[in-house]
Image (cartoon, helix red, strand yellow):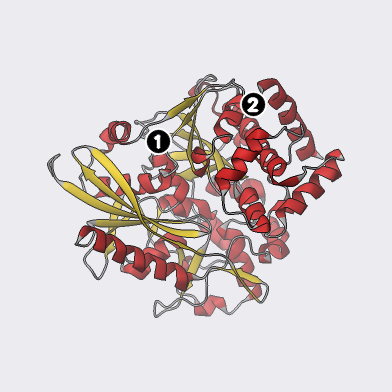
Amino acid sequence: MTSTDEHHALALDLGSSSVRAVLGTYRQGVISTEEVFRLHHQVVDDHGTLTWDLERIMDGVRRSIAMATQRLGRVPDSIGIDTWGVDYGLLDAHGELLRAPRAYRDRRMARWAVDLDRALPVEAAWRETGILPQQINTVYQLYADLRQEPDLIDRVDRFLPLPDLVAHLLGAPAQAGRAIASTTGLASPGAREWSARVLQATGIPEGWMPPLVDDATVAGTTPEGITIVRPGGHDTACAVHALGLAGDEVRLFISSGSWSLIGAAVPSPVLDAAALRAGLTNEVRTDGGIRLLRNLTGFWLLQECQRAWNEPDTGALVEAAGDCASIGVVIDPDDELFASPGDMPAKIAQWCRSHYKVAPEGPAQTVRLILESLACAHAAYAQGLQGVVGDQLDPAAPIHLVGGGARNSLLPAMTAAACHRQVIVGTPEASALGNILAQLEAADVLDPSARGEVLRRSIGSVEVEASGTIADPGAFDAMRERLGNATAD
C-alpha cells in the first residue's frame, strides 16, 4: 500500500460500562479518529449471580458496524475487538453459548479460593504463569464454575476469552490471542502455551482450551466481508500499544480507567521472587513483549460514587474537587470494602472513620480524596516496579499516562507530585488507538517500526512536572506513607 492510500479501521472498545466504536482513518502517515457509536450497558444481577448482558453488547457491536458503514458509504476495511480481561464465554459442541458470561465482580470465587490455593499454591501458580493469583482471574472463576456446576465437564466444548468470543460471534474461528490469554492465569509465561500443570491441578479440561495465536494478525472475516483482526484483545494491551514503544525499550506507564494499571513495558517475563513480593503480574503486549504491572482499583470508585449521587458530569465533580481543600488522608483503593457495587460514598466515609476518625464531607471532598488516593497508590507501586526492574529503568524516567485519566485535570498533576516524576499525558483514547494501530500492522499498511512516528504525527502529549500549585509533593509523601500504613493494618 502506498502512503496516499486510505485504510479505515473500526476499533470496538468494549468496557465494563459501554460499547464504543471508534473509526480510524489512516491517510498519508496520519491516523484520525472519530467515535461513531456508543451504547451503555451494565452488570446484571441474575438471582444473586453477576452476569454480562452479552445480547445487548452484541447488539451494540452490530450497530457499531452499521454506523461505521453508513458513515463511510461502505464497510470498514478491518475491525478489532478489545475488552476488559479475565471474563469469558463457554460454548457447547454446536458452538452455542451455554449461558451469559459471569462478571469478575461476582462473589462465587470467594467460596472456592482457599481450595484452589491449596491445589495450586501461589508460588507454583506464579512460576507456571507469571500471573499474580487473584480471585478475579479466569482460573479462579473456572474453578468455581466447575465446583458449583460439575456437569459443565460434559456440557462445555470450548472456553473463549471475552474479546475472542465476540470475534467468534462475528465470524472468526474459536482461537485466543496471546495477550488476553495471558490474563487468565491458565497460560505459561508469555502465553506460549496453556499450562498443563495449572489445568491438571484445577481440573479444567485441556480440551476446552482454544489454540493460541499471535496478536496483530488476521483472525477471520465477517459475513459482510470485513477483515477481523486480533488487536491484543485486552484493553490495556491495546493502550500500551499506543505508547509507540521501539524494540526492547523499557518504559513506565499508567493506563487509567476503571482499573489503574501501573506498569513497565519490558522485553520478557520477570519471574523472580521480588516481582511476586511486589504484587506484579506479567501480561503479554500486542507486540509480544511483556507488561510487568500492578493492578489497582481506579475510577471504579468515582464511577460508583457518581451512580450513588446520580451525577454524570465528571468534569464538574473534578473541578469542584480542585477548588476544595484536602482532608489530609488517603484510602486504600484495593480494600475489599470497595470491590463490589454499592453505596460507594458511604463505604469511603466508613473506611475513613475506621482508620482516621475523619471523613470527607460532600462530593467535592470525596472526589479529591479518591484522586489523591490513586496518585499515592500510583507512586507506591511505581516505586515497587523501579525496585524490581532496577537498572533497566532510569529512576528519573517520566511516567506515561494514558486512558480515561488523561481527561482528568487533577490526576496527572497529583500523580507527578506523588511520584516526584514528570508525567507525560497521552491520549484518553489509547485502547482504541492501539487497537487501530494493530489493525494497520496486520493489514501490512503500517510497519511496526514506524508506529512511534505515526503516533507523534497523529496525537499530541502534555508534560506535567512534579511540582505546581495543584498538589504539594511534601504533602503527598506524607499521604503515601499513610496509605502504606493503612494497607498494612
Give the Cα separation between the discs numbered 2 and 1.
Answer: 26 Å
Instruction: Look at 74% across and 35% down and name the residue there.
Output: 483
> Quadrant of the image for the N terminus?
top left
Amino acid beneath label 2:
Ala
Is 10 displayed left or right of 156 in the figure? left
Pointer 1: residues within 10 angstroms few (<14), some, or many (20+)?
many
Q: Nearer the viewer, residue 302 or 53?
A: 302
**Image height check: is 90 above or below 163?**
below
Find out whether the residues at labels 2 and 1 contact each other: C-beta distance under 8 Å.
no
**Image height check: is 124 above or below 240?**
below
Is 303 displayed left or right of 90 in the figure? right
Helix, strand or loop for disc 1: loop
Image coords of residue 142 (percent x, y): 58, 65
Pointer 2: residues within 10 angstroms few (<14), some, or many (20+)?
many
Q: Quadrant of residue 68?
A: bottom left
**Number of numbered discs present?**
2
Q: Quadrant of residue 445?
A: top left
- Residue furthest to the right in view is 357
Image coords of residue 466 (percent x, y): 57, 21
Observer-side mark, 2 or 1, equals 2
- According to the picture, the residue beneath numbered tag 1 turns out to be 243
* Mark number displayed over residue 471: 2
**Image height check: is 419 above or below 2?**
above
Image coords of residue 28 (percent x, y): 18, 38
Instruction: Look at 65% across and 74% down and name the residue there.
Output: 148
Image coords of residue 282 (percent x, y): 52, 42
Is 19 displayed left or right of 301 in the figure? left
Instruction: Look at 70% across and 46% down and name the residue there.
Output: 363
User: Can residue 279 be seen by looking at this rendering?
Assistant: no
User: Can residue 130 be seen by looking at this rendering?
Assistant: yes
